[in-house]
Amino acid sequence: MVIADWPGVAAGWSRQIDVPSTAGVDAPGTVRRWHLLDNGAELAGRGLVPAGTLLCVHGNPTWSYLWRSLLAAGCDPAHPWRVVAVDQLDMGFSERTGTFRRLADRIQDLNDLTDAVALEGPVVSVGHDWGGVVSLGWALAHQHQLAGVVLTNTAVHQPAGSSIPPALRLALHPAVHTWGTTTSDSFLRVTHSLAHPPLPADVRKAYMAPYRGAERRAGVGNFVADIPVDAWHPSFSALSGVAEGLRNLKVPALMLWGPRDPIFSDRYLKDLITRLPHADVHRYEGAGHLLVEDRDIAPAVFDWLAGRVSGGGNGSPAVGNAASQPPARAGFQPLWTLLAEQAAGPAGGKPAVVEMAADGTVARSLTWQQLDSDVHRLATGLHLAGVRPGSRVSLMVPPGVDLTVALYACLRLGAVVVVADAGLGTKGLNRAVKGATPDFLIGIDRALAAARALGWAARRISVRDLPAARRRILGVETSLAALTTAGRVRSAGPGDGNGNGNGNGNGNGTYWPDPDSPAAVLFTSGSTGPAKGVLYTHRQLAAMRDTVAETFGIHPGQRLVAGFAPFALLGPALGTVSVTPAMDVTAPRTLTARALADAAAAIDATVVFASPAALRNVVATSGGLSAEGTAALKRVELLLSAGAPVPEPLLAEMQRLLPGASLHTPYGMTEALPVTDISLEQIRAAAFDAGSGTKPGAGNGVCVGRPVHGARVAVIPLAADGTAPGSTPVTDAGITGEILVSAPHVKDMYDRLWLTQEASTGVAGWHRTGDVGHFDSDGRLWVEGRLAHVVTAPGSVVTPVGAEQAIERVAGIRMAAIVGVGPAGTQAVTAVVETVPPVRKAGPAGPELAGKVREAARTAGISVAAVLVVPAQPTDIRHNAKIDRTRLSRWAASVLAGGRAGTP
């Protein structure tokens, strides 16, 4: 052993210890020599008293070197923990025993070692790969001293209906096994290649160090051979014992996962969550099997220890909207309350949901009574198919009758709906679905084909009846039509009649949920990174309904055109008739004026909701409106537009099309919608105040108005480095900071993103939005951009939106983005603009245009160093409006460094 060749390992950590065996494959009293990495001596030498011990167990074919970041972090005086990282026998630098050690033997080996080491204080087990199983076996046997468990990319059970991963099947093949795992070092090299980014050469060398020579790799081969591939395998019983034992393990648990893992995919994480439902979970998007190398997990582990173990936590996941915890059922009315009331009342025979055909006619519709009946029947049918309270059901159905019925049937059943729409793009959608791990997927043919091709592990239900051959190809079990028919002939509802589950079933197709049980996972747009799953409870969805109703005066009997697909789903909850116009719902900019008018005429609409991109195209195509279409739009009373800032000139154009409507642009996000609201008249008043200087704080951003019904808003001031490190919310005028919101309808938590959730709730009782802005002296909120997009120029912090608005007022500029180029603190402020008409090639702007852009930016107090032009800004798919400034920044840096312009 040459410790100097192990980057990141202190010389004092490495030690060996002789351990007598007490049971297992060795005869009692047999002494085995173990190698450990142990920071205990360093802690003692520095006079640090550890809060407890982390017992870290590696998998195959790594060794204790895997845990060096935890060893180092455990020596931090701010959070001292003893870290004991073991080399399992026949692995690493521990003794080569010459015996085949099975799972039960390895658990017993670890028991013997910890008796010899005499671990002090509370112990938290940490495991990776098959070391995760061994560590859990030890944990179950030592619950008297166990304080928690940490797991990274491991498995304790092969999920039903799935085979072991192809890579392991290959390694187990008789023609490959011995050569691939022992004779050669191929298994090691393949495993090391799973790191993202690739391991540095010196780190790869350190991982190889204990395994040089076939005689030192027997343990690697034996580990692979000990994988229980079926119930007849000698280690199947031991593995099953660990798997079932977890169901009664109540200590805090943390699961850190790299989803880019060809061995332990998200299906294994899902299985672990069912066994440890109280666990905190964080998926590191883009990381893989060697998570500990791909990401620095030490901060997460020690933050978790401080909050869950040292801090006396009980292992329950953090609650995101903890400002107030109302009584369990006081005044609670589930999302479908008004739907049922409309069905039972005078409006029962009138339309509730309408679908439009491409030619502008009504394709399908349901009355309130039909909608309520179909929801009941489908809920019953889904229950018969195995959907239960808590089951996750992914809905991949276009807005309209089928989606509405499926959504409310799932909610009434107590299932958790997963809404990951095509607006995320193929890659984003794939990440979202795999991360949410739905139990069932209801989809159109294209979605079912994607599920088959991309390997989504969910039971599949088609929207329409399919021919038998097509069902087999797509792996479809049944259809919505078949389930509705089954529900029609079955008198019993989805409950069992005695209230079992998370709520109360009454046997006739209704379900009364626990208000604080999960109801839906919605996904952010992915415009500022991978789309995040946002978990809502039934109470929070109901609060969203109530907030929208109270803020905008939307009540039963009104009629809604939903040009933004997710909003269509709120229609029945509000008791309003709803219609989605004929458009590509994955591309809001495809909404035409004629399609909007046809939809409005079909239901005599009073309310319209559409994204800014949709409004732009409506204005652009308004010349094709018929007299009937024009008249239908004149009867609209309220227009809502959200998803991105809406320029006043665009609203003014829409006002001409909808002269009788009040125009509002609520501000919000997937995590909290809405947060504030402002009308066109208020926008104009704010612009006047900003221009006249009569209201301190007015200007530099988009004025989004005041908090909506039931919401509170504040900011955490920005520091000189562009971050918001404080914890004291303020509402003083003119102070720019990260925007906070507190409201009954704020999300419960980020789904399987524990670190993100912790960051978002760093200020007790508030959700940190990641947006930046300030208040003016009238209490209006002005949004200045995203915290991640703040530019740190020499001597100043620049928020982008104010300058972007000024630049967009220049004739011939459609969209502008301000980005930073260069190291933090010395970034050059760069403007990237899209022109009308668009340029053919991206690159530096001409002198005349660049001069106009710089002058416009100066009116906002910003000095622009460089101006670039692009044919089209890179925007998100869902809204077609949110510019990917991070991507633009990388592109601009390359162009300004002399690189090829290409396409951002």
Image (tube, rainbow, N blue to C red):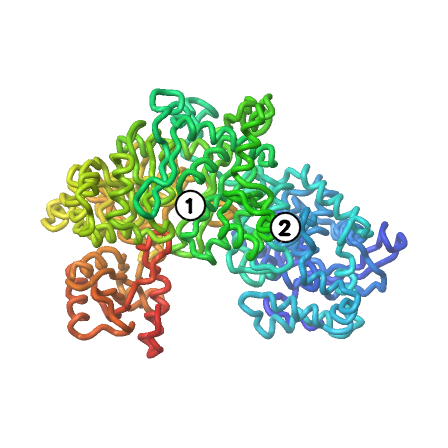
In the displayed structure image, the side of residue 78 where residue 691 appears, left or right: left
Where's residue 808, x and y in %?
20, 59
Query: As shown in the figure, which amino acid type bears the numbered disc 2?
Result: Tyr
Where's residue 859, x and y in %?
15, 60
Total of numbered circles in the picture? 2
What residue is shown with label 2?
268
Q: Is residue 210 visible?
A: yes
Closer to the camera: disc 1 or disc 2?
Answer: 1
Q: Secondary structure at mark 1?
A: loop
Front residue of this view, candidates 15 and 265: 265
Front residue of this view, candidates 70 and 212: 212
What residue is shown with label 1?
398
Label of residue 197 in the image: none
Above or below: residue 237 compared with residue 207: above
Above or below: residue 557 compared with residue 24: above
Q: Residue at x 34, y 36 (%)?
A: 578
Q: Is residue 256 visible?
A: no
In the displayed structure image, the side of residue 861 where residue 273 appears, left or right: right
The 10 Å Cα crowd at callout 2, few under 14, some 14 to 19, many 20 or more, is some
Query: As shown in the figure, which amino acid type bears the numbered disc 1?
Result: Pro
Where's residue 354, x and y in %?
36, 37
